[in-house]
Image: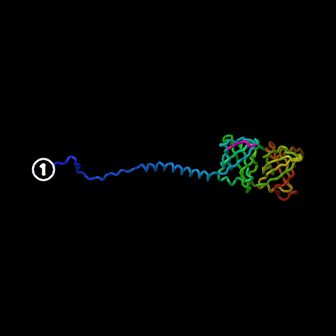
Amino acid sequence: MDKPPPAQANEPQDPGGPDFPEVATVRRARWRLQLVWLVPLVAVLIGGWLAVKAVLEQGPTVTISFKTGDGLEAGKTRIRFKNVEIGTVKKVVLSNDHTRVIATAELTKNASDMLVDDSRFWVVQPRISGGTVSGLGTLLSGSFVSMDPGKSKVVRHDFIGLETPPVIATGEPGSEFVLKGEDMGSLDVGSPVFFRRLQVGQVTSYALDQDGNGVTVHVFVNAPYDRYVTTGTRFWQASGIDVSLDAAGVRVNTQSLVSILIGGLAFQTPKETEGDPLQRKDLQLG
């Protein structure tokens, strides 16, 4: 029997296993190049979105002029309304004539409608005035600028700060009256006003008359007590003690211990002189 011819040395040997498809070589260079550019592109888009968001959320900038820089510090002093933070002082510089201090502040966007012509700003610090103590909380938290929004419709972004806090906030129900007298006695801003020994108001301001012969005192009487001030009302200083001696003994009459210590005003309307209620009228201080 004839034997099969031997296999040639250069012929491939059949391993006898299954046939596998050839693996194609994939080129990744182009994809890697695209991924390299994708990362900075996403970063640019995120940065642009954050920039647009910051611009849309940015509030107004205001300047407030004060006599001194007490309690003002750039980047730290906050601006508050009703004890809620609405802005931050960003810069504190001297005015061009070096007579005042200019504080530049950035407010939140929702405070834009509060920047009107009669809005008021002042620095809150520990104070003692008219027998009242205020601002004690700043001993721990630090001074801040408080705001009292006005009612004007005229928009404004530059203000002159108050050197002392306003006694009456804008919108407080009540009436203001102007009193004329010979001297101030022991009165001061914040001194109480009494009606039938109840404190119903306080002194808001005072000034010497131009002729120097008297003083003008502004008082605010809270509602509903302001309706008891009429054309026949008489005001007098209630800072003393009225002592009288008669057959019944010694009589001592005073408004309150507070009025003895810090002064005050009282008013009464005699029945025979009752008249119509007043609104911001001049009255005589007895």
**Badge 1, how many Cα within 10 Å: few under 14, some, many 20+?**
few
The amino acid beneath tag 1 is Lys
**Residue 201: x, y in percent?**
78, 50
- Nearest the viewer among 190 and 232 is 190
The answer to whether residue 19 is visible is yes
Left of 34 or right of it: where is 146?
right
Q: At 75% from the left edge and 55% from the top edge, which residue is drawn?
A: 173
Which secondary structure lies at badge 1? loop
**Residue 87: x, y in percent?**
66, 48
- Nearest the viewer among 24 and 123 is 24
Residue farthest toward the left in the current orientation of the protein: 1
Check the image and report above or below for 97 versus 271. Answer: above
Residue with the mark numbered 1? 3
**Residue 223: x, y in percent?**
77, 55
Chosen colour scheme: rainbow
Secondary structure mostly seen in the magenta stretch = strand
Q: At 80% from the left edge and 57% from the top edge, which residue is drawn?
A: 227
**Residue 98: x, y in percent?**
75, 41
Residue stretch rendered in magenta on the structure: 91-96
Examine the structure image and report whether residue 169 is included in the region drawn in magenta: no
- Nearest the viewer among 56 and 199 is 56
Examine the structure image and report whether residue 92 is included in the region drawn in magenta: yes
Residue farthest toward the bottom in the current orientation of the protein: 276
Check the image and report above or below for 232 versus 105. Answer: below
Left of 280 or right of it: where is 40?
left
The answer to whether residue 251 is visible is no
